[in-house]
Image (spheres, rainbow, N blue to C red):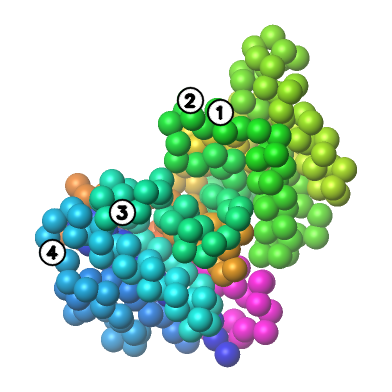
């Protein structure tokens, strides 16, 4: 049995449909028997590659709220299908967060929407690239995701860091097949506070979290300074980094792997991946969008599904 992948097309005003359809065409030879079902607006039916299935979730009304409604319906129906066992993994094209919120989904993004749809607690947002500008892989888990910086800092607790470290550790074992993954915890303050010179969060929150995680059997190090930890991960000292807030992790990740990165949601009962970019309204419809990250998202969904569900044939 081959894995069956569900792909949602995201906001119909953006580049989601373009990069989704182009990605499966680019992977046609590599993943020649891979069944895919797309979920999106009726208007995209004619763009679907003939060998794949399409489920129309409705017609786009031409408004931002209508676009958000279509994007939300696609995610909801695809998740239902995965939970029913119709599909093995979910790949999601980008959505416009304000439009999504205008439909009643009061969530920061798709990660949190998927958390609510599945009832899973906790979940994690992992950015993963198997190849970077350095040639080596890089994996960065964002301990806090799409929150204003002041709010993100208030969310950082010892319990949250332990929760996210454990999510990452278990995913590296089950989905990436690493027996004893090495994890680094990135500090919050300059130079990881320099022994309290630039703040006390490292001493009060981060160091106790590392100590407890190590007592639980995790090979974790830190807190380490943000100006060196990502370089150390890229040169092989660590398998992954836990970043305390969105931009410190994403800034380093996208600098090293722009166009090759994949967003992976940890903690779900199925594999979910997404490209590392947004809707790119400014270039939508110009046929100039780069589908590389979407290609990697589909490829990684297959790879992780293979590792998690070993009975599924990957001769695709």
Question: Can you tell which of label 3 and label 2 is closer to the viewer?
Answer: 3
Residue 154 numbered tag: 1
**Up-down relation of residue 167 to residue 230 (above or below):** below
Of the numbered discs in the image, which one, if any, rests on residue 61? 4
Whether residue 300 appears in magenta in the rendering, the answer is: yes
Q: In which quarter of the image is the N terminus?
A: bottom right
The residue under the point 21% across, 59% down is 67
Q: Residue at x 73, y 23 (%)?
A: 204
Which mark's residue is nearer the viewer, 4 or 3?
Answer: 3
Q: What stretch is highlighted in magenta?
A: 296-316
Residue assigned mark 2: 150
Q: Which of marks 4 and 3 is nearer the N terminus?
A: 4
Q: Distance between the residues labelled 3 and 2?
A: 25 Å
Q: Residues within 10 Å of mark 2 (few under 14, many from 20)?
A: few
Mark carried by residue 104: 3
Figure label count: 4
Asked whether the viewer can see residue 88, the reply is: yes
- Percent x, y of residue 277: 38, 50
Residue 241 versus residue 54 in the image, above or below: above
Q: How far separated are the C-alphas under marks 4 and 3?
A: 17 Å
Q: What element carries label 1?
A: helix
């Amino acid at each position: 049995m081959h894995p069956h992948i569900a792909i949602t097309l995201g906001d119909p005003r953006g580049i989601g449909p373009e990069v989704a359809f182009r990605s499966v065409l680019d992977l046609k030879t590599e993943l020649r028997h891979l069944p895919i079902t797309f979920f999106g607006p009726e208007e995209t039916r004619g763009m679907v590659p003939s060998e794949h299935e399409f489920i129309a979730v409705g017609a786009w009304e031409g408004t931002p709220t209508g676009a958000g409604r279509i994007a939300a319906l696609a995610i909801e129906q695809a998740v239902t299908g995965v939970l029913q066992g119709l599909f093995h993994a979910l790949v999601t094209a980008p959505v416009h967060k304000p439009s999504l919120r205008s439909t009643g989904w009061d969530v920061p993004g798709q990660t949190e929407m998927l958390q609510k749809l599945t009832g899973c607690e906790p979940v994690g947002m992992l950015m993963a690239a198997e190849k970077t500008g350095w040639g080596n892989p890089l994996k960065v888990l964002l301990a806090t995701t799409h929150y204003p910086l002041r709010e993100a800092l208030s969310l950082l607790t010892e319990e949250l860091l332990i929760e996210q470290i454990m999510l990452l550790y278990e995913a590296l074992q089950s989905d990436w097949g690493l027996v004893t993954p090495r994890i680094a915890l990135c500090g919050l303050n300059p130079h990881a506070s320099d022994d309290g010179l630039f703040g006390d969060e490292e001493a009060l929150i981060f160091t106790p979290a590392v100590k407890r995680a190590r007592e639980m059997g995790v090979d974790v190090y830190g807190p380490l300074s943000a100006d060196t930890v990502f370089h150390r991960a890229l040169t092989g000292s660590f398998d992954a980094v836990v970043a305390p807030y969105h931009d410190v992790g994403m800034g380093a990740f996208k600098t090293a792997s722009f166009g090759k990165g994949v967003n992976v949601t940890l903690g779900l009962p199925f594999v979910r991946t997404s490209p590392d970019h947004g809707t790119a309204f400014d270039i939508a419809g110009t046929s100039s969008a780069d589908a590389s990250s979407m290609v990697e998202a589909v490829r990684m969904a297959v790879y992780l599904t293979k590792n998690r569900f070993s009975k599924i044939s990957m001769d695709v």
